[in-house]
Image (cartoon, grey):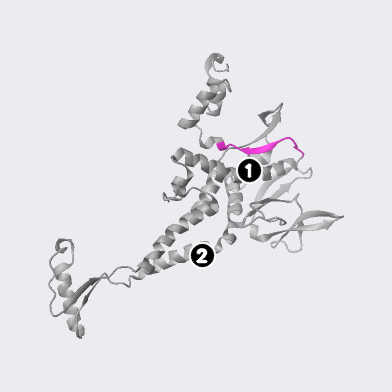
Amino acid sequence: VYGATRLLSDTISTLPLDVYYRKQGVETSFRPLPGWIQQMNPYLSNQEIVGQIMMSYLLDGNSYLATLRNGQGQVLEVTVLDPTTITPNLVDVDGKNVLVFESSNSPGATFTTRDITHLRGLMKPGTIKGISPIRSAREMIGLGIGAQKYGAAFFGNGGIPGALVEVPGQLSEEGAKQLKAAWNETHRGASNSHRLAVLTEGAKFSKVTLSPEDSQFLMTKGAAVADIARLYGVPPHLLADASGSTSWGSGLHEQNVAFSQYSLRPWATRLEQGLTSILRSQGIAVAYCKFDLASLHRGTTESLDRFSKGIQAGIFSIDEARESLALPPLPNNQGQEH
Protein backbone atom coordinates (compact mmCIF):
# COMPACT_ATOMS: atom_id res chain seq x y z
CA VAL A 1 0.00 0.00 0.00
CA TYR A 2 2.80 2.38 0.87
CA GLY A 3 4.54 1.59 -2.43
CA ALA A 4 1.39 2.18 -4.51
CA THR A 5 0.39 5.41 -2.76
CA ARG A 6 3.95 6.73 -2.88
CA LEU A 7 4.15 5.98 -6.60
CA LEU A 8 0.93 7.81 -7.46
CA SER A 9 1.49 10.68 -5.03
CA ASP A 10 5.11 11.36 -5.98
CA THR A 11 4.44 11.09 -9.72
CA ILE A 12 1.51 13.53 -9.79
CA SER A 13 2.99 15.96 -7.27
CA THR A 14 6.12 16.37 -9.40
CA LEU A 15 4.22 17.08 -12.65
CA PRO A 16 4.42 20.67 -13.95
CA LEU A 17 1.25 22.61 -13.04
CA ASP A 18 0.10 25.69 -14.94
CA VAL A 19 -3.01 27.79 -15.58
CA TYR A 20 -4.51 28.18 -19.07
CA TYR A 21 -7.45 29.69 -20.91
CA ARG A 22 -8.72 29.25 -24.46
CA LYS A 23 -8.28 32.09 -26.93
CA GLN A 24 -9.99 31.47 -30.28
CA GLY A 25 -9.92 27.76 -29.54
CA VAL A 26 -6.17 27.72 -28.76
CA GLU A 27 -4.92 26.83 -25.29
CA THR A 28 -2.99 29.84 -23.99
CA SER A 29 -1.05 30.36 -20.75
CA PHE A 30 -2.92 32.55 -18.25
CA ARG A 31 -0.74 35.39 -17.00
CA PRO A 32 -0.06 36.72 -14.48
CA LEU A 33 -0.34 33.55 -12.43
CA PRO A 34 -2.41 33.90 -9.23
CA GLY A 35 -0.12 34.16 -6.22
CA TRP A 36 -1.52 31.08 -4.48
CA ILE A 37 -0.78 28.93 -7.57
CA GLN A 38 2.86 30.01 -7.48
CA GLN A 39 3.09 29.20 -3.75
CA MET A 40 0.09 27.45 -2.22
CA ASN A 41 1.38 27.48 1.35
CA PRO A 42 4.09 29.58 3.03
CA TYR A 43 5.47 26.60 4.95
CA LEU A 44 5.22 23.83 2.35
CA SER A 45 6.26 23.55 -1.29
CA ASN A 46 3.64 23.01 -3.99
CA GLN A 47 4.95 19.48 -4.44
CA GLU A 48 4.32 18.75 -0.75
CA ILE A 49 0.83 20.27 -0.86
CA VAL A 50 -0.16 18.26 -3.95
CA GLY A 51 1.40 15.17 -2.33
CA GLN A 52 -0.77 15.67 0.77
CA ILE A 53 -3.86 16.03 -1.40
CA MET A 54 -3.03 12.80 -3.21
CA MET A 55 -2.39 10.89 0.02
CA SER A 56 -5.79 12.04 1.33
CA TYR A 57 -7.35 10.82 -1.91
CA LEU A 58 -5.59 7.46 -1.86
CA LEU A 59 -6.09 6.62 1.82
CA ASP A 60 -9.39 8.28 2.72
CA GLY A 61 -11.05 8.89 -0.65
CA ASN A 62 -11.54 12.58 0.24
CA SER A 63 -9.34 15.64 0.43
CA TYR A 64 -10.29 18.89 2.17
CA LEU A 65 -8.48 22.12 1.32
CA ALA A 66 -8.79 25.08 3.70
CA THR A 67 -8.63 28.31 1.68
CA LEU A 68 -7.50 31.37 3.63
CA ARG A 69 -8.85 34.51 1.88
CA ASN A 70 -8.53 38.25 2.20
CA GLY A 71 -11.43 40.68 2.43
CA GLN A 72 -11.90 40.69 -1.36
CA GLY A 73 -12.27 36.91 -1.46
CA GLN A 74 -8.83 36.34 -3.02
CA VAL A 75 -7.11 33.13 -1.90
CA LEU A 76 -3.95 33.77 0.11
CA GLU A 77 -2.93 30.21 0.94
CA VAL A 78 -4.13 26.61 0.80
CA THR A 79 -3.81 24.10 3.64
CA VAL A 80 -4.64 20.39 3.35
CA LEU A 81 -6.73 19.27 6.34
CA ASP A 82 -6.75 15.87 8.02
CA PRO A 83 -9.73 14.17 6.33
CA THR A 84 -10.59 12.21 9.47
CA THR A 85 -11.42 15.48 11.30
CA ILE A 86 -13.87 16.86 8.68
CA THR A 87 -17.52 15.93 8.22
CA PRO A 88 -19.43 17.27 5.19
CA ASN A 89 -23.20 17.73 5.40
CA LEU A 90 -25.98 18.95 3.13
CA VAL A 91 -28.30 21.36 4.94
CA ASP A 92 -31.50 22.99 3.71
CA VAL A 93 -31.22 26.77 3.33
CA ASP A 94 -34.30 28.46 1.86
CA GLY A 95 -35.29 25.29 0.04
CA LYS A 96 -31.82 24.65 -1.38
CA ASN A 97 -29.23 22.08 -0.34
CA VAL A 98 -26.07 23.80 0.81
CA LEU A 99 -22.81 21.98 1.53
CA VAL A 100 -21.29 22.80 4.92
CA PHE A 101 -18.47 21.28 6.94
CA GLU A 102 -17.89 20.51 10.60
CA SER A 103 -14.47 19.95 12.15
CA SER A 104 -13.70 17.94 15.25
CA ASN A 105 -10.91 20.44 15.91
CA SER A 106 -13.44 23.31 16.09
CA PRO A 107 -16.57 21.98 17.87
CA GLY A 108 -19.69 24.03 17.16
CA ALA A 109 -18.21 25.86 14.17
CA THR A 110 -19.62 25.49 10.65
CA PHE A 111 -17.61 26.13 7.51
CA THR A 112 -18.82 26.79 3.97
CA THR A 113 -17.37 26.03 0.54
CA ARG A 114 -15.73 29.46 0.72
CA ASP A 115 -13.63 28.16 3.62
CA ILE A 116 -13.12 24.52 2.59
CA THR A 117 -12.95 22.92 -0.85
CA HIS A 118 -13.95 19.25 -0.91
CA LEU A 119 -12.19 17.01 -3.45
CA ARG A 120 -13.57 13.48 -3.84
CA GLY A 121 -12.38 10.18 -5.25
CA LEU A 122 -14.77 7.45 -6.42
CA MET A 123 -18.31 8.02 -5.15
CA LYS A 124 -21.44 5.95 -4.65
CA PRO A 125 -24.68 7.44 -6.02
CA GLY A 126 -26.56 9.57 -3.53
CA THR A 127 -23.50 10.34 -1.39
CA ILE A 128 -21.31 13.43 -0.99
CA LYS A 129 -18.18 11.63 0.20
CA GLY A 130 -15.64 9.61 -1.70
CA ILE A 131 -15.01 5.93 -1.04
CA SER A 132 -11.92 5.08 0.98
CA PRO A 133 -9.82 2.45 -0.85
CA ILE A 134 -8.44 1.26 2.50
CA ARG A 135 -11.85 0.73 4.10
CA SER A 136 -13.23 -0.89 0.95
CA ALA A 137 -10.38 -3.39 0.77
CA ARG A 138 -9.71 -3.84 4.49
CA GLU A 139 -10.20 -7.62 4.42
CA MET A 140 -7.81 -8.07 1.50
CA ILE A 141 -5.22 -5.76 3.08
CA GLY A 142 -5.69 -7.52 6.42
CA LEU A 143 -4.91 -10.85 4.76
CA GLY A 144 -1.65 -9.43 3.44
CA ILE A 145 -0.74 -8.07 6.88
CA GLY A 146 -1.58 -11.43 8.44
CA ALA A 147 0.67 -13.26 5.97
CA GLN A 148 3.47 -10.80 6.71
CA LYS A 149 3.19 -11.37 10.47
CA TYR A 150 2.95 -15.14 10.02
CA GLY A 151 6.09 -15.19 7.88
CA ALA A 152 8.02 -13.06 10.38
CA ALA A 153 7.02 -15.34 13.26
CA PHE A 154 7.63 -18.52 11.24
CA PHE A 155 11.18 -17.68 10.22
CA GLY A 156 11.97 -15.67 13.33
CA ASN A 157 11.17 -18.51 15.69
CA GLY A 158 12.83 -21.16 13.50
CA GLY A 159 11.02 -23.90 15.40
CA ILE A 160 11.31 -26.58 12.71
CA PRO A 161 14.62 -28.52 12.56
CA GLY A 162 16.30 -29.19 9.22
CA ALA A 163 16.50 -32.99 9.63
CA LEU A 164 15.78 -35.85 12.04
CA VAL A 165 17.62 -39.02 13.03
CA GLU A 166 15.07 -41.45 14.41
CA VAL A 167 16.33 -44.26 16.70
CA PRO A 168 14.04 -47.09 17.86
CA GLY A 169 13.70 -47.50 21.58
CA GLN A 170 14.59 -44.84 24.10
CA LEU A 171 17.81 -42.85 24.27
CA SER A 172 19.05 -41.17 27.40
CA GLU A 173 19.66 -37.44 27.30
CA GLU A 174 23.40 -38.04 27.22
CA GLY A 175 23.07 -40.59 24.45
CA ALA A 176 21.03 -38.16 22.32
CA LYS A 177 23.68 -35.46 22.78
CA GLN A 178 26.46 -37.84 21.75
CA LEU A 179 24.54 -38.99 18.66
CA LYS A 180 23.88 -35.39 17.60
CA ALA A 181 27.51 -34.38 18.18
CA ALA A 182 28.82 -37.36 16.22
CA TRP A 183 26.49 -36.66 13.30
CA ASN A 184 27.37 -32.94 13.16
CA GLU A 185 31.09 -33.67 13.38
CA THR A 186 30.90 -36.03 10.42
CA HIS A 187 28.42 -34.23 8.13
CA ARG A 188 28.18 -30.50 9.05
CA GLY A 189 29.96 -27.98 6.82
CA ALA A 190 30.57 -27.57 3.10
CA SER A 191 33.63 -29.84 3.11
CA ASN A 192 31.58 -32.69 4.61
CA SER A 193 28.55 -32.38 2.35
CA HIS A 194 27.29 -35.49 0.53
CA ARG A 195 29.49 -37.82 2.61
CA LEU A 196 28.28 -41.37 3.05
CA ALA A 197 26.23 -41.84 6.23
CA VAL A 198 26.13 -45.21 8.04
CA LEU A 199 23.18 -45.74 10.37
CA THR A 200 23.14 -48.71 12.76
CA GLU A 201 20.67 -50.34 15.12
CA GLY A 202 17.63 -49.41 12.99
CA ALA A 203 18.26 -45.65 13.00
CA LYS A 204 16.47 -43.70 10.22
CA PHE A 205 17.37 -40.31 8.70
CA SER A 206 14.66 -37.98 7.36
CA LYS A 207 14.78 -34.40 6.10
CA VAL A 208 12.08 -32.00 7.32
CA THR A 209 10.23 -30.03 4.63
CA LEU A 210 7.49 -27.42 4.80
CA SER A 211 3.98 -28.76 4.49
CA PRO A 212 1.81 -27.32 1.73
CA GLU A 213 -0.18 -25.47 4.37
CA ASP A 214 2.93 -23.85 5.84
CA SER A 215 4.39 -22.87 2.46
CA GLN A 216 1.08 -21.51 1.14
CA PHE A 217 1.63 -18.15 2.83
CA LEU A 218 4.46 -17.44 0.38
CA MET A 219 1.95 -17.51 -2.47
CA THR A 220 -0.42 -15.43 -0.36
CA LYS A 221 2.24 -12.75 0.07
CA GLY A 222 2.83 -12.68 -3.68
CA ALA A 223 -0.90 -12.45 -4.37
CA ALA A 224 -1.16 -9.51 -1.95
CA VAL A 225 1.11 -7.42 -4.18
CA ALA A 226 -1.12 -8.10 -7.19
CA ASP A 227 -4.20 -7.25 -5.11
CA ILE A 228 -2.76 -3.89 -4.06
CA ALA A 229 -1.72 -3.12 -7.64
CA ARG A 230 -5.29 -3.91 -8.72
CA LEU A 231 -6.77 -1.80 -5.93
CA TYR A 232 -4.83 1.32 -6.91
CA GLY A 233 -4.69 0.62 -10.65
CA VAL A 234 -0.91 0.62 -11.01
CA PRO A 235 1.19 -1.75 -13.14
CA PRO A 236 2.56 -4.57 -10.96
CA HIS A 237 6.06 -4.09 -12.36
CA LEU A 238 6.21 -0.64 -10.74
CA LEU A 239 5.69 -2.39 -7.39
CA ALA A 240 8.62 -4.74 -8.11
CA ASP A 241 6.34 -7.58 -9.28
CA ALA A 242 7.06 -8.69 -12.83
CA SER A 243 4.59 -11.61 -12.81
CA GLY A 244 1.62 -9.54 -14.05
CA SER A 245 3.40 -6.98 -16.24
CA THR A 246 2.40 -8.55 -19.56
CA SER A 247 -1.25 -7.63 -19.07
CA TRP A 248 -0.28 -3.93 -19.30
CA GLY A 249 1.47 -4.24 -22.66
CA SER A 250 4.21 -6.11 -24.44
CA GLY A 251 6.90 -3.48 -23.89
CA LEU A 252 8.02 -1.13 -21.15
CA HIS A 253 6.92 1.93 -23.16
CA GLU A 254 3.41 0.55 -23.60
CA GLN A 255 3.19 -0.20 -19.89
CA ASN A 256 4.30 3.32 -18.98
CA VAL A 257 1.80 4.85 -21.42
CA ALA A 258 -0.96 2.70 -19.90
CA PHE A 259 0.11 3.90 -16.43
CA SER A 260 -0.30 7.51 -17.59
CA GLN A 261 -3.66 6.89 -19.24
CA TYR A 262 -5.39 4.65 -16.75
CA SER A 263 -3.68 5.39 -13.42
CA LEU A 264 -2.44 8.98 -13.42
CA ARG A 265 -4.91 10.77 -15.72
CA PRO A 266 -8.08 10.11 -13.64
CA TRP A 267 -6.42 11.35 -10.44
CA ALA A 268 -4.81 14.32 -12.19
CA THR A 269 -8.18 15.29 -13.69
CA ARG A 270 -9.88 15.22 -10.29
CA LEU A 271 -7.14 17.36 -8.82
CA GLU A 272 -7.24 19.79 -11.75
CA GLN A 273 -10.97 20.28 -11.33
CA GLY A 274 -10.60 20.85 -7.59
CA LEU A 275 -7.90 23.49 -8.04
CA THR A 276 -9.90 25.06 -10.89
CA SER A 277 -12.92 25.43 -8.59
CA ILE A 278 -10.74 27.43 -6.17
CA LEU A 279 -9.44 29.50 -9.06
CA ARG A 280 -12.92 30.32 -10.33
CA SER A 281 -14.20 31.15 -6.84
CA GLN A 282 -12.03 34.26 -7.19
CA GLY A 283 -14.00 35.38 -10.25
CA ILE A 284 -11.56 34.02 -12.87
CA ALA A 285 -14.21 32.19 -14.87
CA VAL A 286 -12.24 31.40 -18.04
CA ALA A 287 -9.05 29.93 -16.54
CA TYR A 288 -8.37 26.34 -15.58
CA CYS A 289 -5.51 24.39 -13.96
CA LYS A 290 -3.74 21.65 -15.85
CA PHE A 291 -0.95 19.16 -15.14
CA ASP A 292 1.51 18.39 -17.93
CA LEU A 293 1.17 14.61 -18.21
CA ALA A 294 3.01 14.69 -21.53
CA SER A 295 6.19 15.62 -19.66
CA LEU A 296 6.42 12.01 -18.43
CA HIS A 297 7.22 10.82 -21.97
CA ARG A 298 9.06 13.87 -23.25
CA GLY A 299 12.45 13.05 -24.75
CA THR A 300 11.73 9.34 -25.27
CA THR A 301 12.31 7.72 -28.65
CA GLU A 302 8.56 7.40 -29.19
CA SER A 303 7.87 11.09 -28.45
CA LEU A 304 10.68 12.22 -30.77
CA ASP A 305 9.22 10.00 -33.51
CA ARG A 306 5.81 11.63 -32.92
CA PHE A 307 7.34 15.11 -33.27
CA SER A 308 9.12 14.08 -36.46
CA LYS A 309 5.91 12.78 -38.05
CA GLY A 310 4.01 15.86 -36.86
CA ILE A 311 6.51 18.20 -38.47
CA GLN A 312 6.41 16.25 -41.73
CA ALA A 313 2.60 16.36 -41.72
CA GLY A 314 2.60 20.11 -41.07
CA ILE A 315 0.84 19.79 -37.72
CA PHE A 316 3.44 21.95 -35.98
CA SER A 317 6.74 23.64 -36.75
CA ILE A 318 10.24 22.67 -35.65
CA ASP A 319 10.30 25.51 -33.13
CA GLU A 320 6.99 24.34 -31.63
CA ALA A 321 8.43 20.86 -31.24
CA ARG A 322 11.61 22.27 -29.71
CA GLU A 323 9.56 24.35 -27.28
CA SER A 324 7.79 21.19 -26.10
CA LEU A 325 11.23 19.72 -25.39
CA ALA A 326 12.30 22.85 -23.47
CA LEU A 327 14.79 23.76 -26.23
CA PRO A 328 15.40 27.25 -27.68
CA PRO A 329 14.16 28.08 -31.20
CA LEU A 330 16.46 27.72 -34.17
CA PRO A 331 18.38 30.88 -35.17
CA ASN A 332 17.12 33.21 -37.91
CA ASN A 333 13.54 31.91 -37.67
CA GLN A 334 14.55 28.68 -39.42
CA GLY A 335 12.19 26.57 -37.35
CA GLN A 336 8.98 28.60 -37.74
CA GLU A 337 7.78 27.10 -41.02
CA HIS A 338 5.15 24.36 -40.81
Query: In the picture shown, does residue 67 fall above or below 291?
Result: below
Estimate the x, y position of residue 286 in percent, counting from the top left: 73, 35
Residue sitting at x 63%, y 41%: 39
Badge 2 or badge 1: first in the primary sequence:
2
The verdict on residue 247 being magenta is: no
Estimate the x, y position of residue 218 in percent, counting from the top left: 39, 62
- Residue 103, can we see it? yes
Q: Pointer 1: residues within 10 angstroms few (<14), some, or many (20+)?
A: some
Residue sitting at x 17%, y 71%: 184
Position of 248 compared to 108: left or right? left
Position of 102 compared to 136: left or right? right
Q: Secondary structure at mark 2?
A: helix
**Residue at the disc numbered 2:** 142
Q: Secondary structure at mark 1?
A: helix
As shown in the figure, which amino acid type bears the numbered disc 2?
A: Gly
Query: In the picture shown, does residue 302 fall above or below 175?
Result: above
Q: Pointer 2: residues within 10 angstroms few (<14), some, or many (20+)?
A: few
Position of 125 compared to 242: left or right? right
**Residue at the disc numbered 1:** 269
Q: Which residue range is magenta in the image?
A: 283-293
